[in-house]
Image: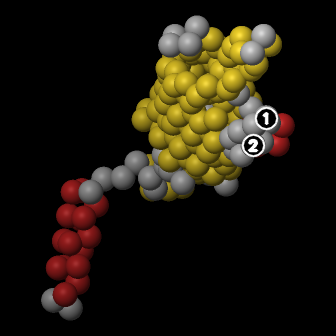
Amino acid sequence: MKKLPLLITLLVITLTAFPQETQRVMGWKISHQAPQNELKLNLATSIFSSMPEITYERILHTDLSLGASALVSLEPDDNDLNLALIPYMRWFFGGNTESLQKCGAGFFIELNGALLSTDIDENVYENETYVTHSKGTTGAGLGLALGWKYLTRNNWVGELYGGAGRDFMNDDAYPRVGITIGKRF
């Protein structure tokens, strides 16, 4: 019997010292921490151009996230782009910001940067003929994309986005296109 007041005291201290975010479901208060990390695969680049793109994204606020994508060409002879690292920031509009489960979803604008490794073909005049040589270069640029993110109740994520960026070092452009699927955890 002496342990019951001690147990109640510890329970009250725990609940007040470590508050959690709460949410109402059918009148019941449910306490839990909403997942804020996402891991995704871009199906568009993986299937159509043999360049798998893996993305990690962190939800910082109900309408703001930061992430990074990495692309690697599996067939460097067929693609000019060999490797890309694309950090980005997304600003979400029109989502349901009252629900913890729906933050970081809906229409978004993305600002991205890119570090690129590309092959550029050069035409060189050798032995009275023009010969094409492939030369590896490194580039860096900035870009913009628009898109939509859908989030299910089981924290599966689907995205559709498109945009482009400018490679300032090589006076070129890079695409930012995706149909992604992933999981929020």
In the displayed orientation, state which residue is furthest to the top.
171
Is there any visible trace of residue 163 in the rendered image?
Answer: no
Residue drawn at (53%, 43%) of the image: 56
Percent x, y of residue 46: 76, 43
Q: CA distance from mark 1 to mark 2?
A: 6 Å
Q: Is the residue under label 2 in contact with that under label 1 (CB below 8 Å)?
A: yes
- Side of 9 relative to 100 (left or right): left
Q: Residues within 10 Å of mark 1 (few under 14, many from 20)?
A: few
Circle 1 sits on which residue? 78
Q: Name the amino acid type tagged 2.
A: Glu
Instruction: Identify which residue, 183 or 171, lies in the foreground.
Output: 171
Identify the coloring: secondary structure
Q: Name the amino acid type tagged 1.
A: Asp
- Side of 4 relative to 55 (left or right): left
Is there any visible trace of residue 156 in the rendered image?
Answer: yes
Q: Which of the labelled discs sits on residue 75, or is there none? A: 2
Dot 2: element: loop
Percent x, y of residue 111: 53, 19
In this rendering, is residue 125 above or below 8?
above
In the displayed orientation, state which residue is furthest to the right.
48
Residue drawn at (23%, 79%) of the image: 7
Residue drawn at (20%, 64%) of the image: 13
Dot 1: element: loop
Q: Which quarter of the picture shows residue 75?
A: top right
Q: Residues within 10 Å of mark 2 (few under 14, many from 20)?
A: few
Q: Which quarter of the picture shows residue 76?
A: top right
Name the image quarter holding the N terminus.
Answer: bottom left
Residue drawn at (20%, 72%) of the image: 10
- Side of 81 relative to 84 (left or right): right
Percent x, y of residue 52: 70, 44
